[in-house]
Image (cartoon, rainbow, N blue to C red):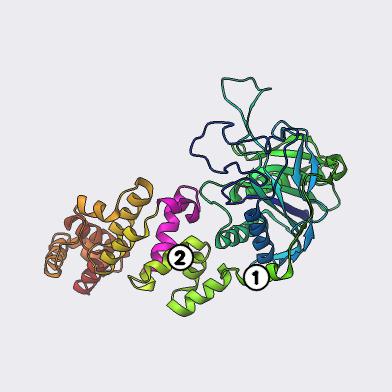
Amino acid sequence: MTSQIMIGLECHVQLKTNSKLFCPCPTRQETEEPNSACCEICLGMPGSKPVLNKKALDFALKVALAFNCKINEKFFFSRKTYFYPDMSKNFQITQYEIPVGSNGFVELSSGKKIRIRRIHLEEDPAALVHEAGLLSSSHCLVDYNRSGIPLIEIVTEPDLSSPQEAREFLDELTMVLSYLDVFDFENGTLKADCNLSIVGNERVEIKNVTGKRNVEKALESEAKRQSELVKQGNQIARETRGFDEKSLSTKTMRKKETEEDYGYIFEPDLVAFELSKPEIEKTRRGLPELHSEKAKRLVKEFGIAEYDAKVISGSRFAGNLFEEFAKAVSPKIASVFVSRDLVAIAHHEGKELEEISGRINAVQLKELLVFFEKARINEKTLKEAAIAHVAGGKNPVDFVKENNLFKDAAGSEIEKIVSKILSSNSKAVADLKAGNEKSLNFLVGLAMRESKGKAEPREIKKLIEEKTK
């Protein structure tokens, strides 16, 4: 990609409130029954009057402050013309002229600052449901349970220069949302409208891309497509495109609307709102320790590796989990387990650790780590038990007991096993003495098999090296 590209993101984050933005309907339901959590307000029926959810405003203020925004003490809501079936009243209540916060920034690891144009509140549209086999391609169903759920929209300036920078920005964004505890990582949705242009050409929007990985892939695909068009001397059309996760490509949806097409007007059913200076300052003082500060503190306070500290502080959940484990076992054991083992389990499922937090029982895992520190189980068993716990909901200690994985081989027994393996594999011993490191792994594997996996590999390796000097 030789052409200079410009990327701006419009990130839509569902806020972790119990009720919707302008009505008391629940945001999370006991049942998945479609259209069971909506009322005359979120459906926009004549005569219904919206009332702003104070908790949603509090969350938006926290996010705006955390991203260094100027807070607008006075603001109001607008109606945005919206002619799609997922908004039954044909307009969306949002903020346009004056948002909650503006002119903020996020700093990337390179030191580059990505400017944030605005952070504002708006209501989520309903969900369009395409039932395979039941409907033709020209029809879909609408579930209004989602309509009216509170969103914050975070709009950047076109300061991002690559899909990789966009991914890093989203990593920073989700880390902050994690620490502020305003987003439900297990059940909530974070989507981005991705705007990309090659300098000197029209801008293209990729609509409603879900997930950080998909944002990066969508931008890579679109940058490649536009670059090829420019090389061929073709014009780039200003349009809205969608991202196909299967083909990893973007496809035309419709001609891109302009701001004038939305016909913004002042929302007459809501009064203007005002935030007092004391309220803003109280919220600012109440912001939690964020990830960059936490990483520095963990290195200083616990003496763990800087890399592990950065991974652990990447989410509020992981940070709290580490500090809980460090009360029972050494900080090094706790940090390696969280930053490598648990993170690896989550990534194997294509998720972040925060997204599987509901499946992790800190008390049970802490007991498992105590057994590991006391050398009652080896590293292999520790990992297997953790996988059984997270993936299968198994108590990890019960998993160890049921599979008879506690180490019961005493030191003298291990030494007998090693001596037996060395005496019956003279060629491998000779190769090892000649400098063949593969022979060492071979002999360790034989000894582990003889001990039925209950010995510690590092202990076996040490004994073999001592006996073959």
Which numbered dot is residue 431? none
Nearest the eye: 157 or 189: 189
Q: Magenta span covers which residues?
A: 334-359
Does residue 107 appear anywhere in the picture? no
Question: Magenta: predominant secondary structure element?
Answer: helix
Q: Position of residue 110 (x, y in %)?
A: 66, 68
The residue wearing badge 2 is 320
Does residue 125 appear anywhere in the picture? yes
Q: Position of residue 43 (x, y in %)?
A: 68, 34
Residue type pointed to by label 2 = Asn
Residue at image coords 68%, 66%: 65
Circle 1/circle 2 CB separation < 8 Å? no
Classify mark 1: helix, strand or loop: helix
Nearest the eye: 180 or 286: 286
Residue at image coords 38%, 72%: 332
Decide which of tag 1 and tag 2 comes sooner along the chain.
Answer: 1
The relative height of residue 89 versus residue 399 in the rendered view (above or below) is above
Q: Position of residue 22 (x, y in %)?
A: 68, 45
Name the side, left or right, on which 245 lies relative to 121: left
Name the side, left or right, on which 80 lies relative to 186: right
Query: Which residue appears farthest toward the right when viewing the image?
Result: 260
Nearest the eye: 116 or 88: 88
- Image quadrant containing the C terminus: bottom left
Residue type pointed to by label 1 = Lys
Residue at image coords 48%, 60%: 317
Which numbered dot is residue 282? 1
